[in-house]
Amino acid sequence: MSFFGSLGKKAVEKAYDLASKVEGGRDYLTTAANTVNSLVKGKDPRVYLKPGNVIQFLSRSSGRTIQIVVSKTSNELICDAIGGTGSYYPNAHWLVVCTSNGRYCFHNNYNYLAINNGKIIIIPSTSNEKAPTEAEFRAQDVLGSAQAIYLESVHMPGYFVNFNDAGEPSEDIKLKTKEKFGQFEIQLIAYGPGIQPEKDDPSIEKSDELAPPPYWAAAANASNNPSHTESNPTSS
């Protein structure tokens, strides 16, 4: 049994708090909670975090997915957590890009999910270019849950992707790893090239909701008609 395998849940929490104060400590301990969670029944969401996979992030606070939309006020691309689930919602599809030390970036049609200056933002960039440093995340496990993760910024340690119950980005995204606002489950949309499918994969539920237009189309419409800046056709 490994050292981490012998740690209890409270011990791992204390170890993580200590690691947050040591440079490089967070990367060293990203497997600690995962080791504890291996005793909890359920599929590890990390199996879907493989290069080229297309996934969705289901927020445990809003019950909806992270998607890119157009701001109602500035016509800029932003994100919220009230997207639909399944293959009909391209605004909420994220291509997994793996970087060094088990870190990840998430890309959607020439845009990266990112955190900068303490805010959740969208950074335009092609997937063929090197991902911006602000777009790199650690996948931290939720202690006691084998099915959820947190997305912590590498660029700004201690800052997490998180949304409130209404699916809006939280004003303060510096969280402790115990809050549901930053907890996400992963839905698989498509496997990347050469990725071996997981056994007993559940099929993605098909929604009866009307799929929204792509956000890039909404942005173009808003540019042509300044008086019309509605951005959230998936709101319910």
Image (cartoon, rainbow, N blue to C red):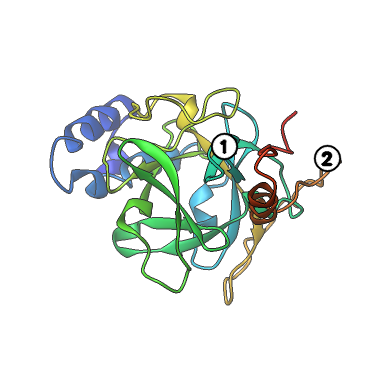
Q: Quadrant of residue 26?
A: top left
Q: Nearer the viewer, residue 220 or 161?
A: 220
- How many labels sit on residues? 2
Residue found at x 60% / y 54%: 55
Q: Amino acid at mark 2?
A: Glu
List the residue tagged with mark 1.
Answer: 80
| x then y, percent, for residue 166 | 60, 24
Does any portion of residue 122 appear in the rendered image?
yes
Which type of secondary structure does the marked residue at label 1 adopt? Answer: strand
| x then y, percent, for residue 150 | 43, 39
Please tell me whether residue 167 is drawn above or below residue 43 in the rendered image. Answer: above
Q: Quadrant of residue 36?
A: top left
Q: Local crowd at mark 2 within 10 Å, few (<14), some, or many (≥20)?
A: few
Q: Quadrant of residue 216?
A: bottom right
Residue found at x 58% / y 62%: 109
| x then y, percent, for residue 183 | 49, 33
Please tell me whether residue 150 is drawn above or below residue 2 in the rendered image. Answer: above
The quadrant of the rendering that contains the C terminus is: top right
Q: CA distance from mark 1 to mark 2?
A: 17 Å
Q: Nearer the viewer, residue 44 or 40?
A: 44
Q: Amino acid at mark 1?
A: Asp
Q: Local crowd at mark 1 within 10 Å, few (<14), some, or many (≥20)?
A: many
The residue furthest left is: 22
List the residue tagged with mark 2.
Answer: 209
* Residue 175: assigned label: none
**Is 11 positioned to the left or the right of 193 in the image?**
left
Residue found at x 78% / y 46%: 205
**Is 105 positioned to the left or the right of 48 in the image?**
left
Does any portion of residue 147 appear in the rendered image?
no
